[in-house]
Image (spheres, rainbow, N blue to C red):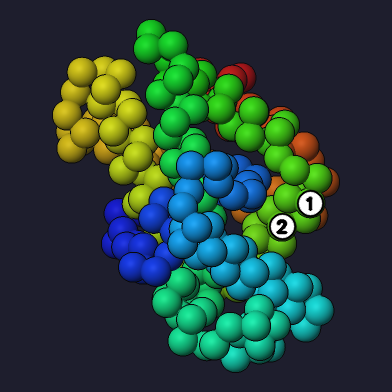
Amino acid sequence: MTAARTKTPEPSAAPDSRATSPAAPAPGPAGTAGMGLRERKKLKTRIAIRDATYRLIREQGYEATTVEQIAEAAEVSPSTVFRYFPTKEDIVLTDEYDPLLEEDLRARPADEPIVESLRQVLRRAVRLGPAEEPEISRLRTKLMVEVPAVRSRMLESMSVTGRMLCRVIAERTGRDAGDLEVRAFSMGLIGALTEVSAYWAEHDHQDDLGDLVDRTLDMLSTGFRA
């Protein structure tokens, strides 16, 4: 989500997929009840590729894991992997979270400060994440810190979540989403939450992620305290 380039979803990928939002757990599918058979099959394939990738990385490390191995483990062809995920880094980072984040933010009271809205939404995400997701979140943040290619790709992709926050903040404030103040505030929030993820990983995930998010949002709201 930096001001680098926005990642465009591949034609065969799920239409609402985005890079993982910083400091949020990696959620499961964003509800399949309203999806057609084709969309459900695509989502199933995406999940199979991601699950195979996580499993292989845990077993043999990131650098040793190849797209060919991922394809074999997911029972698809390498070309299918690349149709859904342009790079190996995207497999690690991409999920279906941003649309849910935007929906939850829009559901918050219109007069609530955006930092408080974000706090409540992220608290809910951390609290309600399925039992298996913390392990995935720890793996992702560990890779973000240890693997330069993953961190670089994450920074490139941050513009997606940043633009979403710009839209929400612009609606709240009556400003244009392209205003400098809106863009600076949105990307400041995203940058801060990215550092939460890095700090969490660098300290061996010993801290409570929700507490780290709260500390960071408190600092953004009130500044440093004596």
Instruction: Please tell me whether mark 1 sits on a helix, a strand or a loop.
Output: loop
Residue 198 in view of the camera: yes
Residue 195 in view of the camera: no
When asked about the image quadrant of residue 82, the answer is bottom left
Residue 44 coordinates in the image, percent (x, y): 59, 63
**Circle 1 is placed at which residue position?**
132
> Mark 2 and 1 residues: CB-CB less than 8 Å, in contact?
yes
State the CA–CA distance, disc 2 to disc 1.
Answer: 7 Å
**Circle 2 is placed at which residue position?**
136
Q: Dot 1: few (<14), some (14–19), or many (≥20) neighbours within 10 Å? A: few
Seen at 39% across and 69% down, the residue is: 12
Seen at 21% across and 33% down, the residue is: 177
Residue 58 coordinates in the image, percent (x, y): 78, 73
When asked about the image quadrant of residue 43, the answer is bottom right
Q: Return the mark for residue 84.
A: none
Closer to us: 217 or 224? 217
Seen at 36% across and 50% down, the residue is: 160
Q: Left or right of 179: which side holds 133? A: right
Residue 194 coordinates in the image, percent (x, y): 53, 48
Residue 26 coordinates in the image, percent (x, y): 63, 50
Instruction: Please tell me whether mark 2 sits on a helix, a strand or a loop.
Output: helix
Q: Left or right of 73: which side holds 97? A: left
Which amino acid, mark 2?
Answer: Ile
